[in-house]
Image (cartoon, coloured by chain):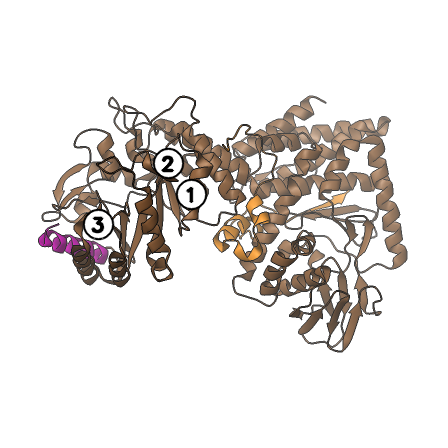
Chain colours: A orange, B brown
């Protein structure tokens, strides 16, 4: 029986996208997880990159 | 069903669709068992509904399958009736409950029906499978038995129960949440090839609708064979007469029955839920569970679902699987993060890069078909290309570049039309070919040795002068000074391609910086090893200002000015902290991205967006930690100053509910670390 004995997850998230060949990935699934890569102008809480210019 | 009833029902549905301009009206013939009506009557009912309601009609039937025949299938094809079948798993699982009056099981009959529906001619009418959970059945065996019938979709149903008549429980059995989580795990590992409604609805609330979960308005009404309107059948488990409305199709419109208080309360979303549900952080996902499951005699439906704990367990498990496990986030929030925690981050980038490829590939651009084929025949070569830092910044035309690079790595012969940008034909991870006066798009023929463009053959082991190879600084860490996509950093200027002496200097600089860390703060090396794939040299501005940068969509790349080893070590820690948190945020949102509020931070003039403040805090937490570990009074002073700045930023971030619960937990963990210094 395939029980979940331990809720600690050692496998990384989104493993289905890495295991499934590209041509067989559901486009809707791809679009739903990839939304963060294309923020829109209303995403005022986000930044596109983190530039640093000073001295550490 | 009397013909007059059918005619009136069809008229009511058509009237409702017309009044509300509905593009689709789903009508499900169900039971009891709808096939008991017989083929002729089924055809008459379907024909009348189709003729009266018109093209908006989405006609379905939910059957136990026992009476399904090729004749019924032919009728279903003619009248476009989607057929859903109830199947509870393998023979043992299914025949626990679904038996004939004589005691014999129905499993074999159902399999025969499904064989009919799988026939090529009938695939279009095969709507899917419904499975009612029984905890005595192994979840993965049930899932596999369902998948073996090749359904286009399926759903897993919790047995109807209330607080008065709790769900069936069995000695030693797992919870319903654990049962569903086990299926979810297998489904995910299998690539989620078949939609499972309850999972999709919980993953995409508001996008995928389900009666069992979510805050979507109740949009169904049951019409009995005598024409009386009822609410959902499942209400019958609550109390006698619960499903009744007192209305029928002869005297009331669909709008009138929709105004029934018990239906109306399920159309106002969160406001129609119990106080416990309204205050719950996952209410948007479960929506309080299925309406009948909330029933308790004393308080009616003003309760969470009797499956509340199970749904919460499932949602938490799904978030851990699709998001990032809590232990990983807790470990990373402490600063460096142990090796097993940081090892979870690069796979996130890889998964998102692949998702990006699929999204870009939908329109079939040059390179997509070749890339998808190579992913089947040479997955390691594709993986080597798609895990490079700038893949997620690709547009559709870049798929050709990626396919060509993967083909060369695989030793495969393909021909693909590749765009030339800024006079460069870029083959990610391999290098770029300088082309002058070339067309915007050129055909590239790949081989095991290299590739050919027009009349020029490029052997990678003996390339012509136009070939600009990618150079490594250390095993697994490239110098990226050629790919135009590296220009990913606001306010920063990337350096042009470096000569060999400058590359050598970078190798020495990076080695020395990592040696510096190894000597004073080795805790940060696993994070760098697990994330850093490319250094993007920045052009010094002549003022001596240290500059560096990272970008959320360029996981693995750090842009930085050439600095002495100790300074470079700090800049690497700073930027790798950004990369780590960026990957976490990719799968675990910690704030509302649309929140326009700004946060004051000590290290920068002017308030920052929430992500900027959170990222800066995490980056300076790492830098402060490195200074803390370095010897001498200068280091002590830098540490003290940065510790105070991080403390102040954490104070600003944790007021005003800027962060969601995951973000608040991450910030609290950072605070605990700083307080312990």
User: Is the residue B149 above or below the residue B584 in the image?
Assistant: below
Inter-mark Cα distance, 2 to 1? 10 Å
State which quarter of the image contains the C terminus of chain B.
Answer: top right
By secondary structure, the bulk of the magenta-drawn segment is best described as helix
User: Is the residue B533 above or below the residue B363 in the image?
Assistant: above
- SS assignment at label 3: helix
Residue B5 falls inside the magenta stretch: yes
Q: Which residues are magenta?
A: B1-19
Crowd class of label 1 (few under 14; some 14 to 19; many from 20; radius 10 Å): some
Q: Quadrant of residue A53?
A: top right
Inter-mark Cα distance, 3 to 1? 24 Å
Between B516 and B179, the one lying in front of the other is B179
- SS assignment at label 2: helix
Q: Earlier in the sequence, mark 3 or mark 1?
A: 3
Between B111 and B657, the one lying in front of the other is B111
Marks 2 & 1, CB-CB < 8 Å contact: yes
Which residue lies under the disc numbered 2? B93
Which residue lies under the disc numbered 1? B145
Inter-mark Cα distance, 2 to 3? 23 Å
The answer to whether marks 3 and 1 sit on the same chain is yes
Between B93 and B243, the one lying in front of the other is B93
Q: Earlier in the sequence, mark 2 or mark 1?
A: 2
């Amino acid at each position: 029986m395939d029980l979940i004995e331990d809720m600690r997850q050692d496998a990384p998230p989104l493993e289905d996208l890495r295991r499934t060949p590209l041509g067989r990935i559901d486009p809707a699934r791809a679009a739903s997880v990839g939304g963060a890569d294309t923020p829109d102008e209303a995403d005022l809480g986000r930044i596109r990159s983190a530039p640093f210019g000073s001295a550490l | 069903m009397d013909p007059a009833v059918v005619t009136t029902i069809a008229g009511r549905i058509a009237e409702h669709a017309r009044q509300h301009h509905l593009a689709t009206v789903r009508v499900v013939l169900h039971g009891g068992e709808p096939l008991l009506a017989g083929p002729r009557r089924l055809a008459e009912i379907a024909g009348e509904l189709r003729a009266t309601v018109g093209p908006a009609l989405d006609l379905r039937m939910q059957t136990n399958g026992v009476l399904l025949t090729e004749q019924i299938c032919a009728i279903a094809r003619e009248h476009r009736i989607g057929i859903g079948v109830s199947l509870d798993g393998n023979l043992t699982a299914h025949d626990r409950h679904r038996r004939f009056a004589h005691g014999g099981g129905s499993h074999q009959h159902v399999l025969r029906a499904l064989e009919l529906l799988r026939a090529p001619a009938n695939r279009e009418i095969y709507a899917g499978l419904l499975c009612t959970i029984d905890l005595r059945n192994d979840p993965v065996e049930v899932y596999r038995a369902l998948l073996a019938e090749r359904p286009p979709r399926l759903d897993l149903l919790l047995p109807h129960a209330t607080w008065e008549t709790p769900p069936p429980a069995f000695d030693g059995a797992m919870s319903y949440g654990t049962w569903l989580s086990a299926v979810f795990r297998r489904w995910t590992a299998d690539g989620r090839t078949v939609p499972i409604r309850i999972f999709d609805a919980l993953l995409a609330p508001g996008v995928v609708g389900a009666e069992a979960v979510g805050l979507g308005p109740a949009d169904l009404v049951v019409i009995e064979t005598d024409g009386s309107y009822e609410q959902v059948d499942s209400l019958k488990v609550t109390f006698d007469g619960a499903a009744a409305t007192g209305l029928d199709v002869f005297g009331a419109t669909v709008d009138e029955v929709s105004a029934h208080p018990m239906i109306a309360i399920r159309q106002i979303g969160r406001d129609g839920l119990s106080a416990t549900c309204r205050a719950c952080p996952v209410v948007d996902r479960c929506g309080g569970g299925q309406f009948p499951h909330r029933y308790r005699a004393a308080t009616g439906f003003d309760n969470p679902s009797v499956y509340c704990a199970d749904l919460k367990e499932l949602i938490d498990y799904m978030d851990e699987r699709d998001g990032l496990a809590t232990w990983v986030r807790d470990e990373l929030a402490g600063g460096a993060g142990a090796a097993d925690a940081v090892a979870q981050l690069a796979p996130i980038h890889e998964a998102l890069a692949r998702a990006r490829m699929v999204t870009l590939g939908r329109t079939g651009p040059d390179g997509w078909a070749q890339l998808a084929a190579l992913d089947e025949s040479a997955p390691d070569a594709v993986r080597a290309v798609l895990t490079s830092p700038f893949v997620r910044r690709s547009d559709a035309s870049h798929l050709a570049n990626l396919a060509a690079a993967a083909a060369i790595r695989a030793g495969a012969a393909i021909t693909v039309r590749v765009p030339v940008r800024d006079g460069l034909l870029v083959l990610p991870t391999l290098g770029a070919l300088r082309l002058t006066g070339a067309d915007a798009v050129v055909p590239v023929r790949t081989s095991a040795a290299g590739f050919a463009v027009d009349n020029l053959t490029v052997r990678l082991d003996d390339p012509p002068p136009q070939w600009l190879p990618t150079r490594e600084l250390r095993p697994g860490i490239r110098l990226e000074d050629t790919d135009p996509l590296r220009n990913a950093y606001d306010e920063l200027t990337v350096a042009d391609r470096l000569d060999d002496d400058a590359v050598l200097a970078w190798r020495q600089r990076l080695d020395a910086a990592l040696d510096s860390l190894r000597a004073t703060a080795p805790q940060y090396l696993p994070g760098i090893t697990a994330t850093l794939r490319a250094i993007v040299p920045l052009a010094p501005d002549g003022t001596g200002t240290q500059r560096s940068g990272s970008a959320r969509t360029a996981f693995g790349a750090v842009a930085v000015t050439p600095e002495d080893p100790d300074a470079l070590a700090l800049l690497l820690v700073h930027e790798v902290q950004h990369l780590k948190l960026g990957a976490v945020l990719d799968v675990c949102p910690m704030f509302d991205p649309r929140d326009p509020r700004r946060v004051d931070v000590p290290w920068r003039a002017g308030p920052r967006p929430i992500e900027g403040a959170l990222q800066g805090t995490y980056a300076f937490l790492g830098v402060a930690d490195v200074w803390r570990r370095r010897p001498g009074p200068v280091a002590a002073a830098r540490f003290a100053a940065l510790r105070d700045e991080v403390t102040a930023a954490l104070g600003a971030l944790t007021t005003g509910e800027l962060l969601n619960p995951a973000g608040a937990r991450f910030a609290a963990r950072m605070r605990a670390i700083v307080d312990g210094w």
